[in-house]
Amino acid sequence: MKILIVGAGLSGAVAGRVLAEAGHQITIIESRPHVAGNCHTERCSDTGVLVHVYGPHIFHTGDAEVWDYVNRFARFRPYRHQVMSTSHGAVYSLPINLHTINQFFGRTFSPEEARRFIEDSQADRSITDPQSFEEQALRFVGPALYEAFFKGYTEKQWGCAPSELPASILKRLPLRFNYDTNYFAHPFQGMPEDGYTPMVEAILDHPGIDLHLETPFDADMAGRADHLIWTGPLDMYFGARLGRLGYRTLDFERFTHDGDYQGCAVMNYGDADVPHTRVTEHKHFAPWESHEGSVLYRETSRTCGPEDIPYYPIRLVKEKAMLAEYEQLARAEEGVSFLGRLGTYRYLDMDVTIREALDFARGFVAAWR
Ligand code: UDP
């Protein structure tokens, strides 16, 4: 079958590869001049630092098959993600762990003491079924830690009150009563040695895949294919006829520094009066390399306009209602499948994106055998 895939990010590349290996004829078009979507990486010619061009991407998963899959296309180096947060003039480690709690409250709690302290004197136990981000925070860490680490950061990141956001966003972060400062709890974690772009190029390197960069979608191309896989924004496939689905976009103020600027890969800023959410120092994402110079991004978040790059789907009540209508249109569209973060309008980590692309493509192969 002749299949046209729109977008050469993780979804398009993985689905394309599985389908090409099954004997389908794949054409992938990508509007940008590079593959890998928002996990694109590029070496800085001045400093030699591998830069995560669209912001930091850390590969972590509990899915052994997905881990094997990415390791087939890139050599992964061990990487342990640690995040620091500056709040009210002090530096703490995230996710909230025993060190954070002891430092914040000036105590020397053991794990059990800290658990009891948070549960008995901080957590709001009147909240039995937290629905919003704010309720989830107040229920599990209480108002002081919420205000210091989550409230201001989340208002800046999402542009709305945490009481309007779903609890699922905060559930991404664990709360630990030990000194484990690994940001993720997944068993498999690492970074592709040469960055994500060579990994995605390797996935796309198959004789059954024809890749065209800097090629926008046009309807005639779709007409020549037997099936279309759309990994661009769901609403844009339909010309935004029901309105635009809301996203947050990011602005990166890039700057360089001689030596080590902040001593860690990610420094978050919890205070509401600091305009940026975080500063990322890219050489620390590749700790096996050594560079004198340093490349940094100062990151701020704002509403995504028509010309901006969409990053985080907002998914508030209004967006969810519109999404349901677009999903209905998508289901009615014959010969078209919608895939990935933008194609399904969801906050997806890279491993889930790959898992869904593998499952989709295998299902497709089985159905058309
Ligand atoms: N968050 C926060 N303070 C922090 C880090 C995260 O309030 O210092 C909240 C924020 O709302 C964020 C969410 O937790 O959107 C999930 O954090 P994660 O680190 O997973 O965000 P990502 O790296 O995907 O932007």
Image: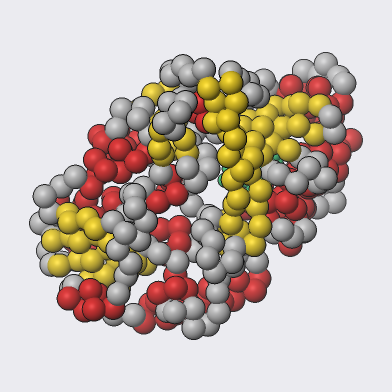
Q: Is residue 167 visible?
A: no
Q: Quadrant of the N terminus?
A: bottom left
Task: Please say if 265 is above or below 24.
Answer: above
Residue 66 placement, left or right of 202: right
In front: 54, or 79? 54
What residue is shown at x 66% (from left), y 32% (from top)?
Answer: 267
Residue 189: x and y in percent read: 44, 30
Q: Evaluate whether residue 228 shows in this view.
A: yes
Report x, y in % for residue 54. 49, 46
Position of 149 with respect to 9 (left or right) is right
Residue at image x 15%, y 47%? 206
Quadrant of the image where one finds ligand 1:
top right
| Quarter containing the C terminus | bottom left
Colour option used: secondary structure
Residue at x 87% of width, y 21% of height: 106
Above or below, 88 against 359 in this view is above
Report the side of 117 relative to 336 (left or right). Answer: right
Question: Residue 176's spot in the image, x, y percent?
Answer: 68, 30
Image quadrant in which you'd find residue 205: top left
Outermost residue on the front side: it is 46
Where does the image place residue 296, in percent across and percent down from the top left? 58, 33
Label tally: 0
Between 212 and 150, the one lying in front of the other is: 212
Residue at 42% x, 23% y: name it.
78
Q: Quadrant of residue 26?
A: bottom left
